[in-house]
Image (cartoon, rainbow, N blue to C red):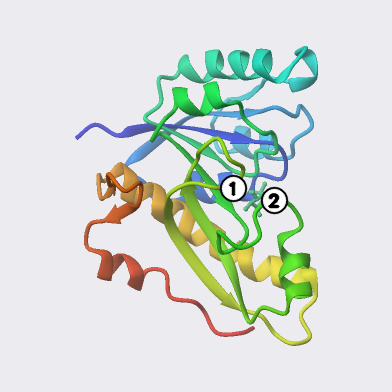
Amino acid sequence: MADKSIVILISGRGSNMEAILAAALPARVAAVISNNPDARGLAVAAARGVTPVVVDHRRYADRARFDAALAAEIDRYAPDLVALAGFMRILTGAFVARYDRRLVNIHPSLLPAFPGLDTHRRALAAGVWIHGCTVHFVTPAVDDGPIIAQAAVPVAPDDTEERLAARVLAEEHRIYPQAIRWICEGRIVLGPDNRVQVRDRGQALGALVSPPLD
Ligand code: GRF
């Protein structure tokens, strides 16, 4: 089977993008696109041999025009999958519909808990014992959509936001390439109930066990 093609969208550091680029996947990253010309991840992509592309949202009058320009750029690569990796723009319903079942995101919380920003600070403030990250299909609602994979980490009583963020990020780098691998291998099925079914779920869960406290 021919390798799948992926386009990754970033806005900043790009560490999840780098984890995907570094993973041995049955897929080729055709392009990395950033809405932010100053995104640190652009240089990281270039260093790994992927030509970085900028579609600067500030050059477009409104969200719809930016999304149309972004879609035009993405479609040049005809990707099987579009992966949001720290992409900090809210996408229009038209954009999300265009990439229906082909658009995935990583979010730094155990959704549906803590959608939105500042997830680690909010998790600490709420006093949760367990925190984590989620890979999901994207729907028009922010940080919503069928869950593909999750990983949990323990929260220490004296955790700082930075320590907790680092612990979660390590898991993000593990499960995002894993989820993309499952999708590329055809192991992910979105059921009629809009829930994700993973073939060989037991084996899949085994890949998501949480690490001990550091
Ligand atoms: C990650 O925590 C991701 O879950 C969130 O934004 C952050 C992006 O980090 N959506 P990076 O750019 O991948 O390093």
The one nearer the camera, 180 or 141, is 141
- Dot 2, crowdedness within 10 Å: few (<14), some or many (≥20)? few
3 or 63, which is in the foreground?
63
Q: Quadrant of residue 128?
A: bottom right
Task: Name the residue type under label 1.
Answer: Asp
Q: CA distance from mark 1 to mark 2?
A: 7 Å
Q: Judge by depth and name the residue closer to the eye, 191 or 61.
A: 191
The quadrant holding residue 99 is top left
Identify the residue shown where x is 67% and y is 34%.
90
Q: Quadrant of the C terminus?
A: bottom right
In the picture shown, does residue 76 fall above or below 101? above
Q: Is residue 13 above or below residue 98?
A: below
Farthest residue toward the bottom? 157
Which mark is on residue 176?
none
117 to 78, vertically: above or below = below
Query: Closer to the N terminus: mark 1 or mark 2?
Result: 2
Looking at the picture, which amino acid does disc 2 mark?
Gly
Label 2 near ligand 1 (CB < 8 Å): no
Q: Find out whether the residues at labels 1 and 2 contact each other: C-beta distance under 8 Å.
A: yes
Q: Of 105 and 42, which appears nearest the observer?
A: 105
Q: Which mark is residue 143?
A: 1
Q: How many discs mark residues in the rendered view?
A: 2
Q: Position of residue 206 (x, y in %)?
A: 34, 73
Q: Where in the figure is residue 185, as x and y percent of width and height?
A: 26, 46
- Write down the residue under mark 2: 116
Which residue is found at the position 76% from the left and 26% from the top? Answer: 37
Please tell me whether mark 1 sits on a helix, a strand or a loop.
loop
On screen, residue 63 versus residue 25, left or right, reads right
**Where does the N terminus fall, quadrant-wise?**
top left
What residue occupies the far left of the structure in this picture?
Answer: 1
